[in-house]
Amino acid sequence: MKWTVVVFIGISMLFAGATAEAVPPEAQVRVVHASPDAPPVDVWVNGVPAFTGVEFGQARPYAALAFGRYRVQVVPSGLLEPVVIDARLFLRPNKYYTVVAVGLLSEIAPLVLWDRNNFPPLSLARVRFVHASPDAPPVDVAVTGGPILFADVAFTEVPQYIQVRPGVYDLEVRVAGTDVVVLSVPGVPLDGGTVYTIFAIGLAFPGMGDPPLQALLTVDAFSKFKAWLPSLDGSVRLREPASPKIRSKGRR
């Protein structure tokens, strides 16, 4: 299966009241749409549209915001109501955050993550797993034919990051404590000096509808020394933001 790697680079955004004279310490924020039955959405920050037309399974690049308190509201794309999420966030300076819209639309809620985006050494990749499938049971994430990397992870749980040697990994998502595979994720490329997040999104069980259970891989940060190095397949890739197209569907 072909994987398209989604790379995030901080993008400056101007909001009402910002000035050019003084630049306060900033936080970096991105959004991920993981609510399987929700339509495309717009995300408003302090009354200003910040991310528009965000579709299910889409992750948007980081945006820079001055540290402080913010009101974040989510509405159907192109509309002013209904407000399906209305949350207050406090952003600390020089920190990275991911705000994930999780759950079915009737119970949609924000899952706010702190992203550990300082670079690991070039000899290691750092990766974490986010369980964002609302109907999936607790799961284990394992290397196919190998060790368990993340054990007994329930919906909205996010285990600690782990560090692994660079390589291409075939992964399995299993019902926790069993050998029952609910999602196969082959060919996951993990480069050294790079930080990744693997999201499990979608619906796990037949009869729940679409979209089915699938994986979304994001490249959250990478060492500047890796920007022009050959990739694992031998090609040279200029690392720029790209549209998320990673899909590895589970069994229905």
Image (cartoon, grey):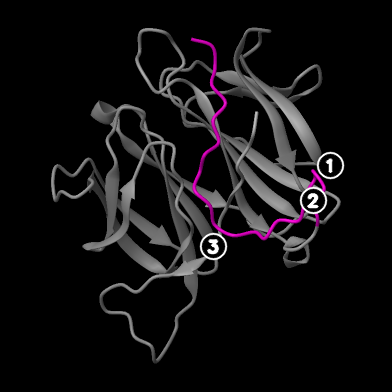
Which range is magenta?
230-252
Q: Kindly report the distance in space between the C-alpha atoms of the residues bearing marks 1 and 3.
A: 26 Å
> Residue 226 location in percent, x, y?
76, 61
Judged from the image, the secondary structure of the residue bearing numbered disc 3 is loop
Three-letter residue code for mark 3: Lys
Q: How would you classify the magenta stretch by its main secondary structure?
A: loop
Q: Please name the amino acid that badge 2 sits on.
A: Gly
Question: Could you tell whether 150 is left or right of 48 in the image?
Answer: right
Circles 2, 1 touching at the beta carbon (< 8 Å):
yes
Which of the two marks, 2 or 3, is nearer to us in this view?
Answer: 2
Q: Dot 3, how many residues are within 10 Å of its Cα: few (below 14), some (14-19), or many (20+)?
A: some
In-front residue for pair 170/4: 4
Which residue lies at the image location 43% right of the left edge and 42% below the top edge? 58
Q: Residue at x 84, y 41 (%)?
A: 165
| Residue 92 visible | no
Kind of residue indicated by mark 1: Arg
Picture quadrant of residue 66: bottom left
Q: Secondary structure at mark 2?
A: loop
Count of all numbered marks drawn on residues in the image: 3
Q: Determine whether the residue tagged by mark 1 lies in a helix, strand or loop.
A: loop
Residue that badge 1 annotates: 165
Residue occupying image coordinates x 82% and y 43%: 166
Location of mark 2 (residue): 192
Residue 127 in which image quadrant? top right
Q: Which residue is mark 3?
A: 95
Task: Give whichever of 120, 252 is nearer the camera.
Answer: 252
